[in-house]
């Protein structure tokens, strides 16, 4: 007798419900690593519940959502899926820390052509690692199988983070003044932006064999593994900094590079004067510029160039700020100062 149940119909349409169940079971061990004091329930409910911390005068929730761009394409080609989740978390939590908010929880969304449970669990293991690095709990998510909409091997990953900050402690750039100093926090590489240009420069979509060849300009690493290096998460170091030093502005340097992101934290009438010679450009950016014949202005307008985050402090606080950042794993250094300017950024 032919069965006409929904599950049979769904399977015939290309959606494997049992794969979904298996993926959830496989990812539970990773999710368990991220539990923190606010978690109220286990995986599998319709909504993730989280208790807000107490003790703030005016608690303000801060949210951010983002994906990893076309960096996912490289992860798929290299069949390495356990770090792309770190990127998804980083892109969200590094944004919300810019106003001083401590991340509370994170949710992920994975769209795939076909649900391969082990692959999905590997992706989620990276998400969990990013959550551990940022102190956020992974309290929910969704894996959506999209047969016919995307090829079986393809997937995309996005996330959503919520943090909290006392209203009086929100980073206030109106306090920024001429003479303040811009400090750089180094990146781990390209992070998660500018991959569409990288795909063109290195012919990534055609699985260029050069991606897998050790490159002397990259210290013997391959282009592929260098590009896939996960985005650095700055949450804990920035939280330590703002706890002890007055921070007047923070920029997460993502798509749009220096020219778009540093100005976002600077009030009208002032500008950041960046000393080009002081920027410690990572080798991967020199390789990209040379291979693609890309002008320096365009590089600084697309990539982080080795600076994943910048912070602005008073001149007298610079030594203390750098000391705190270094104690928290950031090899921080000065790249410029704040000047009176109609242009919000000047690189010279």
Image (tube, helix red, strand yellow):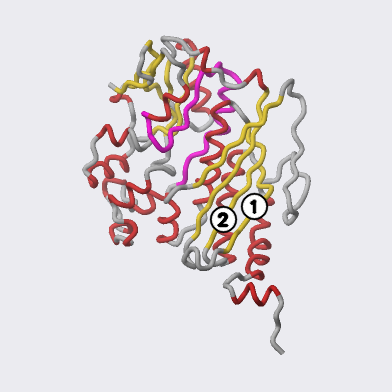
Task: For the C terminus, give its image quadrant.
Answer: top left
| Residue at (62, 74) in percent of width and height | 11
CB under 8 Å between discs 1 and 2: yes
Q: Range of the magenta residues?
A: 230-259
| Residue at (56, 41) in percent of width and height | 65
Relative placement, left or right, of 154 versus 294 is right
- Badge 2 crowding class, 10 Å Cα cut-off, few under 14, some 14 to 19, many 20 or more, is some
Residue under numbered circle 2: 110
Q: Secondary structure at mark 1?
A: strand
Q: Position of residue 328 (x, y in %)?
A: 54, 30
- Badge 1 crowding class, 10 Å Cα cut-off, few under 14, some 14 to 19, many 20 or more, is many
Q: Position of residue 343 (x, y in %)?
A: 35, 18
255 vs 38, nearest the viewer = 255
Relative placement, left or right, of 64 versus 50 is left
Quadrant of res 203: bottom left
Task: Report the disc number at residue 141.
Answer: 1
């Amino acid at each position: 007798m032919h069965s006409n149940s929904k599950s049979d119909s769904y399977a015939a349409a290309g959606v494997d419900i049992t794969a979904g169940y298996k993926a959830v079971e496989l990812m539970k061990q990773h999710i368990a690593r991220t539990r923190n004091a606010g978690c109220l329930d286990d995986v599998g409910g319709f909504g993730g519940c989280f208790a807000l911390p107490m003790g703030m005068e005016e608690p303000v929730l801060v949210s951010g959502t983002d994906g990893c761009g076309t960096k996912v394409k490289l992860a798929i080609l290299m069949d390495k899926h356990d770090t792309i989740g770190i990127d998804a978390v980083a892109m969200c939590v590094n944004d919300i820390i810019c106003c001083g908010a401590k991340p509370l929880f994170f949710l992920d969304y994975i769209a795939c052509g076909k649900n391969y449970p082990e692959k999905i669990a590997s992706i989620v293991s990276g998400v969990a690692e990013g959550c551990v690095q940022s102190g956020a709990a992974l309290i929910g998510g969704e894996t959506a199988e999209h047969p016919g909409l995307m090829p079986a091997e393809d997937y995309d990953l996005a996330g959503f983070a919520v943090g909290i900050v006392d209203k009086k402690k929100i980073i206030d750039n109106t306090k920024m003044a001429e003479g303040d100093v811009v400090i750089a926090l180094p990146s781990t590489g390209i992070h998660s932006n500018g991959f569409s240009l990288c795909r063109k420069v290195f012919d990534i979509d055609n699985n260029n064999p050069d991606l897998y060849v050790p490159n002397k300009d990259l210290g013997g690493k391959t282009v592929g593994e260098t590009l896939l290096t996960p985005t650095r998460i700055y949450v804990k170091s920035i939280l330590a900094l703002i706890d002890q030093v007055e921070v007047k502005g923070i920029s997460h340097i993502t798509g749009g590079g220096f020219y778009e992101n540093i100005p976002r934290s600077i009030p009208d009438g002032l500008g950041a004067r960046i000393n080009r010679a002081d920027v410690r450009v990572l080798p991967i950016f020199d390789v990209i510029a040379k291979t693609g014949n890309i002008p320096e202005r365009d590089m600084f307008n697309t990539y982080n160039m080795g600076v994943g985050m910048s912070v602005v402090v008073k001149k007298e606080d610079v030594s203390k700020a750098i000391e705190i950042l270094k104690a928290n794993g950031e090899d921080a250094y000065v790249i410029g100062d704040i000047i009176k300017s109609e242009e919000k950024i000047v690189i010279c």
